[in-house]
Amino acid sequence: MQTMIRGLISPIETFVRELGRVVLMFAESVYWGVRRPFKLDYIFKQMEFIGVNSTVVVIITGMFTGMVLALQSYYGFRKFGAEGLVGATVALSMTRELGPVLTSLMVTGRAGSAMAAQLGTMRVTEQIDALTVMALSPIKYLVTPRIVAGFLMLPVLTVVSDFIGVVGGYVVGVKLLGINEGAFIDKMIKYVELNDIYNGLVKSAVFGIILSSVACYKGFYARGGAEGVGKATTEAVVVSSVTILISDYVLTSLMF
């Protein structure tokens, strides 16, 4: 009986412990982030890595997401003679949900995995220990710039994704499927509010903090050589992606 209870409690205990360590790392990174000297060059480098280098994959994802949304919405609305609502549907879907979520998932796969691998390699090769020996905070130099960059760049990438998605929907809906251009744009302007865009950007900022915090945590505490780095990278992507989807539901229920 005790073995069975222990088997049930152990995963919960592990989850709570891991969550606590992630929160503590994030709190420590915030603490070091507001203390001088500010390592702006480190932050700009991570902004380039997370944001600029992810632009192409975000554009491709946003474009084809908007195109597919327009295509599917058209065939559904055509049954009711409401093809003009395709533009509003594409814009609302992109700004509220698909833009922030898909952008975050793509950045997690591209940049989050790389962050975990970089820090994991530094951990197993004792470079992080060397910083500690030199009385330098590894959190300040390695973690804080990545979390700040994730927080700042995810909303920017989401704006790009939203815009490109709407353009893709317009091309498919108006140019390929023959939806009236005036109705497409008019319904989009009528039904899409600024709060939809703002709330989507808030979501993306939260997702940026989540993916960068989890990736840094998994890499920072990697153990076991090359195998441990690979395991930490895989866990960073899986945990970040699942957490983003869960938090998306929570944020949506609070915002809309």
Image (cartoon, rainbow, N blue to C red):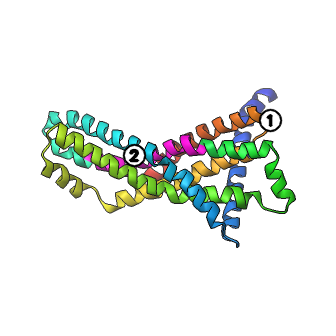
Q: Earlier in the sequence, mark 1 or mark 2?
A: 2
Taking the magenta stretch, the answer to whether it contains residue 70 is no
In this rendering, which labeled residue sits more in front, label 1 or label 2? 2
Name the residue that disc number 1 marks: 224
Name the residue rendered at 35%, 48% in the picture: 94
**Residue density around tag 2, few if under 14, some if 14–19, many if 20 or more, within 10 Å:** many
The one of 180 and 171 positioned closer to us in this rendering: 171
**Residue density around tag 1, few if under 14, some if 14–19, many if 20 or more, within 10 Å:** few
- In x, y percent, where is residue 187? 19, 52
Name the residue that disc number 2 marks: 59
Amino acid of disc 1: Gly
Residue 254 appearing in the image = no
- In x, y percent, where is residue 66? 32, 42
The one of 250 and 202 positioned closer to us in this rendering: 202
Q: Quadrant of residue 74?
A: top left
Name above or below for residue 226 compared with residue 17. Answer: above
Q: Are marks 1 and 2 in contact (CB under 8 Å)?
A: no
